[in-house]
Amino acid sequence: MVIARHRLRERRRARADAECLAGIATSRRVMVVETSPSGHRLVFVREIVAEALRRRSSVVFATTESVLRDPAFARHVAAFAQMIELQLVPGKLTVKGLQVRASALGCDLVIVPDALKYRSALLPGLTRRLPLVRLVIMNDPLWEVRRRWLPSPKLLLKRGVLLLSGARRGVQILWLRGQGSRRTASIVVDPLLLDGSVSSIREDAARMRSALMMDEGTFWFGIVGALDARKNVPLVIDALRKAARETGIPVGLALLGPWSDPVTERSASTALATCDYRVVRRHDALTNREMNVAVAALDCVVMAYSTSAPNSTAAKAAALGVRVAAAGSASFRRFVSQVTGLAGASLDVDAVARELVAALQRPLPEPRKLTGSEGLTDPLLAPISVPRRYR
């Protein structure tokens, strides 16, 4: 009897996963919530909104005035402004607060693409009458484990709260995973979003190289996107100096994106003052399409990141056939390895220099076919009747 029940439960779970991955939507009205314009959050919003509209759901975008004023909103979401309803919300809301607002607007599903700030989902009083809330956890606390056999009590508490939050009625937790992960009803894959064909991106990349005077006799490393502290630009500058001296190969560094803060800019400028190779700059913020073009314009993308989460830059490089030099935490290197097959390095100057030397000697990789926007949108817009699975 126990075995029969277990098999029935497993069949139901398998059917739920199949329905999820088939992309069937039963929601009549969807609220998408994002109160931060940074990173790729509004790119995710763009993809969710576009797919919900394609499935003929009406969409409410709940956000703040600061997001609406941010250039990222104009780049990614403004094109849908006439097709969706905009609702202003406070910067801080509880999950129950989101549910009450969504219910008042006639929504039956609430999607929060970056939900770690809503850990307070463990709240009493959630009822079946309120809309389902799907919370995407972009930074799994398990990625912070330095020694897998000895997680800290704080880390266990963080993850325990998340799991218990997902067990509450009306709340579903979905976990962001990197490319190559198994897709289920509770997994959201960090999607590859090229916004154009590979051939058109390469044509634009050639024009970018010409505009920035990136000569063909130089091997161009580069860092793309907002240049913040977690991208360790000064460390990369010093490591490239060591790699260039060791190999004697003419190298250059392309910094393609704006500085995120004055402190990062000052520390990088100090390191650049002593470098003995060419450096080119593009200072403006990049759209997702321009990010792809910037990656394709490089001979090697450098990702020496202080982060534990999946990163879309590695997927862009793999899809476009561009070399990658990666360094960072064990979990970050694991995510990059799933996409590129490369082991990566630890985050220190000597190790990064060795990784850059290896990249100089590496042939161009073949472009890889990776999971697109469906890895994000199918689980989030899946039928509400789908049973919850947590891991």
Image: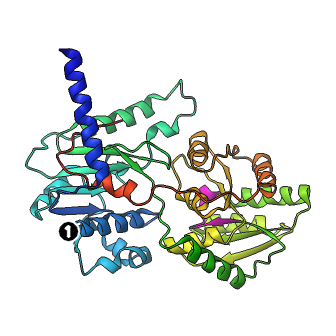
Element assignment for label 1 = loop
Q: Position of residue 69 (x, y in %)?
A: 37, 78
The amino acid type of the residue labelled 1 equals Arg
Q: Is the N terminus in the top left, top right, bottom left or bottom right quadrant? A: top left
Q: Relative to the observer, which residue lies in front, 391 or 241?
A: 391
Name the residue at the left extreme.
129
What's the residue at 24%, 32% (across, down)?
11
Q: Position of residue 319 (x, y in %)?
A: 57, 60
Q: Is residue 367 above or below residue 294?
A: above
Residue that carries the numbered disc 1 in the rendered image: 56
Name the residue at the top extreme.
1
Q: Colour scheme of this structure image? A: rainbow
Q: Is residue 207 above or below residue 138?
A: below
Q: Relative to the observer, which residue lies in front, 206 or 276?
A: 206
In the visual, does 243 lie left or right of 375? right
Q: Is residue 207 above or below residue 123?
A: below
Which image quarter: residue 123? Answer: top left
Q: Which residues are magenta?
A: 222-231
